[in-house]
Amino acid sequence: MKNNYINTLLFLAFSFTVWGQTKAPEPLLPVPSKNQLRWQQMEYYSFIHFSVNTYTDMAWGLGNEDPKIFNPTKLDCRQWARICKQAGMKGIIFTAKHHSGFCLWPSKYTDYSVKNAPWRNGQGDMVKELADACREYGLKFGVYLSPWDRNHPDYGKPEYITYFRNQLTELLTNYGEIFEVWFDGANGGSGYYGGANETRKIDAKTYYDWQNTYKLVRKLQPNIVIWNDGGDRADLRWVGTEAGYVGETNWSLLNATGDVPEQMLRYGVENGNTWVPGEVNTSIRPEWFYHPKEDKKVKTLPQLMDTYYNSVGRNGTLLLNFPIMPNGLIHETDEKNVLAFAQARREAFSKNLLINTKTQATNVRGKSSQFAPQKAIDQSKESYWATDDSVTKASLTVSFAKPTTFNRFLIQEPIWLGQRVKAFTLEAKVNDTWQQIAKETTIGYKRILRFNTVKATQIRLNITDAKACPLISNIEVYQAPIILTPPQITRNQAGVVHITPTDAESELFYTLDGSIPTSKSSKYTDAIDTGLGKVTVKAIAFSPQNKLQSEVAEEKFEIARKHWSIVGIQDKKALHVLDGNEYTSWQKDKVPTDLIIDLGKEENLVGFRYLPDQNWWAEASIISQYQFYVSNDNSNWQLVSEGEFANIKNNPTWQIKEFTSVKARYIKLKALKNIQENAASGYAELDILTN
Ligand code: FUL
């Protein structure tokens, strides 16, 4: 707040003393502090999750894990820093202490740390090794210090706050400049707590006395930004989801006090009285810590690109997490995908098509060249196009020297003067006619729009509503290459096939006869009814721009499940096991449990296949031991297969079991045990094999 006030005074002083020039617009409060502005300009940086629970394959440590399990024999913080640097990231935030309470630096205030781990014979300091690696690679360094500590005996008592601040002091004093500190919102619950093994509840608003903790943080690290979810309002906000996106409407504002429902976190508050911008935190894998079973679930290039457009492209920053493997390294798939993502961004944003174009605007502040529309394309982010104070609607037109093809538009406000624009549209002049290509709300620090390629002679930005005279510091236009990865092929219960491209601009071609598709095969325009029989669908994505095509996607489907029904289960969600969608599931809180299906008519069965629930939080329900029965009357059952789904914990993909051919109308999958030997069974899909 104080910083904002000083900024305002400096600005006013500056604008009144420059005689003879048009007065600069006054800041529209609130505005970001210098630290928040510097942070926003980083745009993209990484999270690293590593702790004792990496060795127990759990999302959260319990606080009783033996430090002896912590032994990353190949630990190399320079590998992490190299990958982050090559990925185009600007910093790393490290889980110095996660909820388990285990400290990755040799804190003076506890024995529950690397001091008692075999790693580096108890002499190691991982926070230092990473801080050094960051410095070597020119990255900023930040720390995650979990307020919740499931190990500490005093957690929940006032004494713990002293302990917490002592640890903060160590981290913010001994490791050079820290750009961000992360205070996680998960607070209180069951834990070891020095052997008490109980549940301790705290009031996250009052227990930590955040205001005094913040004072300490700012005293020790004057350039820092504080992230806090759950406690008093800090410098940065959570966006209400870990799925990797923030709202398209995204105000960097909240109110200083009062509760913040998830909706507000997602969109910010248009008339909020405090600058609290959103940081999009998400993991490159489903979970934050490393779990071998997620090795095939690393976010792919198109998923990472979506995350980027939905975070940095929506006035947020992107905090992308790497889980560290037990050996101390980032997995090769994570590295490969994040570097492919960097390469794709370089290709997409390599050539700004607005350089050397001509601009004009419906209003220019004081008709002064200092605020001319050309300032929005002059490649300086400091200068900006501004209108007169009385104006809240204005247009800026750019003329290309020749018809130009593009599919991305990037726009920025000079946010140090406040976030102003409430609504805008973008038009392109195609064959002498203006076409609207986007209708949007907020801009903020950066907005990037994706749309299908247009070929235009001019573009027109219309600011249709703003909180004060609009200011635009930068616009850019690009032609991003189409991302050609194999499309996704699904078939629903009725036998209808859908093919989904990863890039909406690509064209799809397919075959149903097993032959390799080319751009001369059938073009996919709508769902394909493939009848009830078995079918093999092969498909490619094709770029009409450069005539390139993806690798071939292939799915072999068994007979359609159109006439199947689930016997004796009222829960409608059970139908998810037949819907052909791997991401929907049905859960039963019972083991053993029977899933009986009426196939509608007698079939010649030679096997079955089961896909467990794919959601990481449902992993307890993965069936590990089963029996499979068939029947012709739903009363006399014949056991045709039994045993285990080996390695399903680490690799929860389709489990295929074959058996001697048998004719039957009813099937029954009996779940006998799940991987955690508790009472839950979960199913994404169940299918049969026929001959
Ligand atoms: C969450 C934590 O509970 C997760 O384990 C992880 O650290 C994530 C970034 O924040 O709230």
Image (cartoon, grey):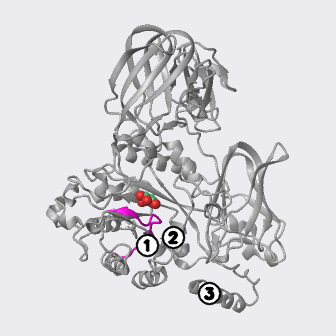
Determine whether the residue tagged by mark 3 lies in a helix, strand or loop: helix
Q: Position of residue 425 (x, y in %)?
A: 77, 56
Distance Cα–Cα, label 2 vs label 3:
19 Å
Magenta-span inclusion, residue 616: no
Q: Amino acid at mark 3?
A: Tyr
Q: Amino acid at mark 2?
A: Trp
Which quarter of the picture shows residue 470?
bottom right
Q: Bin the neighbour count of mark 3 within 10 Å (Cα to Cα): few under 14, some 14-19, many 20 and up.
A: some
Relative depth, front residue between 300 and 435: 300
Q: Which residue is mark 2?
A: 39
Determine whether the residue tagged by mark 1 lies in a helix, strand or loop: loop
Q: Is residue 600 above or below residue 134?
A: above
Q: Bin the neighbour count of mark 1 within 10 Å (Cα to Cα): few under 14, some 14-19, many 20 and up.
A: many
Q: Residue at x 63, y 46 (%)?
A: 479
Please provide the residue range marked out in magenta: 176-191
Assess whether mark 1 and mark 2 are in contact (beta carbons under 8 angstroms).
Answer: yes
Q: Quadrant of the N terminus?
A: bottom right
Disc 2 CB within 8 Å of nearest ligand 1 atom: no
Q: Which residue is mark 1?
A: 179
Ligand 1, by image quadrant, is bottom left
| Mark 2 or mark 3, earlier in chain | 3
Q: Which residue is mark 3?
A: 5
